[in-house]
Image (cartoon, grey):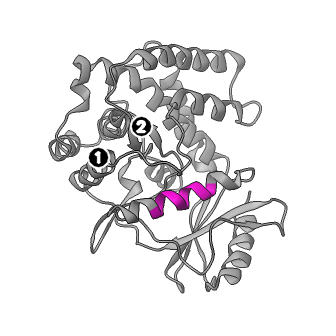
Amino acid sequence: MTPEDSCAAVIAMALRTGLDPRGADLLQAGPHHTWRLSRSGAVAKVWAPGTAFETAARDTRIAKWLLHNGIRTPRPAGNSTYPLTHTGGRYHLQVSFCEDLGDRPCGPGDLADVLRCLHALPVPAGLGLTRFDPCRDLAGRIRDLPPGTLAPDQERHLRAVLADTRTAWRTAPWDPPCVIHGDATPSNCLMTEHGPALIDFERAATGPSQWDQAAGSWARDAFGTPPERYEEFARAYGHDVTTHDEGRTYRMMTPVFAIAAWLYAAEHARTEPDLQDEADRRLATVLTDPLPPAPWGWLPASRASAQATT
C-alpha cells in the first residue's frame, strides 16, 4: 500500500462520513497509514491491506468501552460506524476515523496511571479480545516478511528463540489476566488538556499486566532512555516489574521485545528505506547468542530516519 493508495481511501471515506479531507497530512506510514484531517479535527487510520473487518472493528469497540469506563481515548469522528471498507482502488482497505487529540506524548508517570486504571477493569465480554500470545504474533509477522528479508539460518534462529520463550511463557508466575494494551509505549499515550489518553489498540488482548509494565524498562535497556523515566513509571504504577520473580520474568520477555522492535523497523523500512540501517543493526543484535548486555544503543525509529536524511 502506497501513500497514494491510502490517501485515496481516506478522501473517499471521509466524504462518505461527512468529514473534510482537504489538506490531509500523512502522520505515519508502515503497515498501517495514519492521516491527520486538520479541517475536521480528525485522524484517519487506513489498515494494512488484508486486515480483516473484525480486526479493525474491534479497535473502535475497545475505544468505546474505555470511554464508558472513564479512560480517555479518541472518540469516533464523523457520522458512520467504523471501519468503512474502501473498494475503489487496488486493495480493499478498512478505514477508521477518530478525533484528533494532538501529538504530545505523556510522561512516564501519566502512562503508569492510565495503565493501572486499565489493568484494574474487569475483563469484559463482547469485545472480541484474544488471549495474549506474543510469540504466535511474532511468528506470523516473520512469516509475512517479503522473501529474502531473512536468510534461512536467521529465520531458524528466530523461530527457535520464540519456541523456547513460548515454553517459558506458559510456566511463568503471571498475575491474573486482565485487559492489556499490548504496545504500551509513550507514543501510544497522548497528553490532552483533560489528562492522558490511550490510543492504538491493535495489540490489545487479555494477558498479564507485566507485559505493559515492562515496556518502559525495555526502552531503557534497548534505546538507552534515562533510567529515571522507568523509575518514575514504576513509582507511579506501584511495582517494579524487573524484580518480579527475582527478575526471571523480565529476562524471559526481553528476546520477545527485541524481535518485536526489529520487526517494527523491518516492516517500516519497506516504505521508509532510511530505516533499513537501523533494522539491520537491530537484527544483528537479536541474532547474537546470548543477547549482549544492555543498553544496546538502538535508535528510536524517528531518530533513525532523521539521522539517515541529514
Residue stretch in magenta: 56-64
Nearer to us of marks 1 and 2 is 1
Q: Could you tell me which secondary element the residue under label 1 belongs to?
A: helix
The quadrant in which residue 207 appears is top left
Q: Could you tell me which secondary element the residue under label 2 belongs to?
A: loop
Is 140 in front, or is 187?
A: 140
Instruction: For the N terminus, give its image quadrant.
Output: bottom right
Mark 2 highlights which residue?
Answer: 298
Residues at marks 1 and 2, CA–CA distance in whole angstroms: 33 Å
Kind of residue at disc 2:
Trp
- 9 drawn magenta: no
At x 41%, y 15%, the residue is: 171
Mark 1 highlights which residue?
Answer: 120
Residue 179 at x, y percent in the picture: 40, 44
Looking at the picture, does residue 112 appear above or below residue 75? Answer: above
Question: Badge 1 local density, few (<14 within 10 Å), some, or many (20+)?
Answer: few
Residue 187 at x, y percent in the picture: 40, 55
At x 38%, y 48%, the residue is: 185
At x 42%, y 43%, the residue is: 299
Looking at the picture, does residue 291 appear above or below residue 281? Answer: above
- Check the image and name the residue furthest to the front: 125
- 57 drawn magenta: yes
Kind of residue at disc 1:
Ala
Tell me the chief SS of the magenta region. helix
Count of numbered labels shown in the rendering: 2
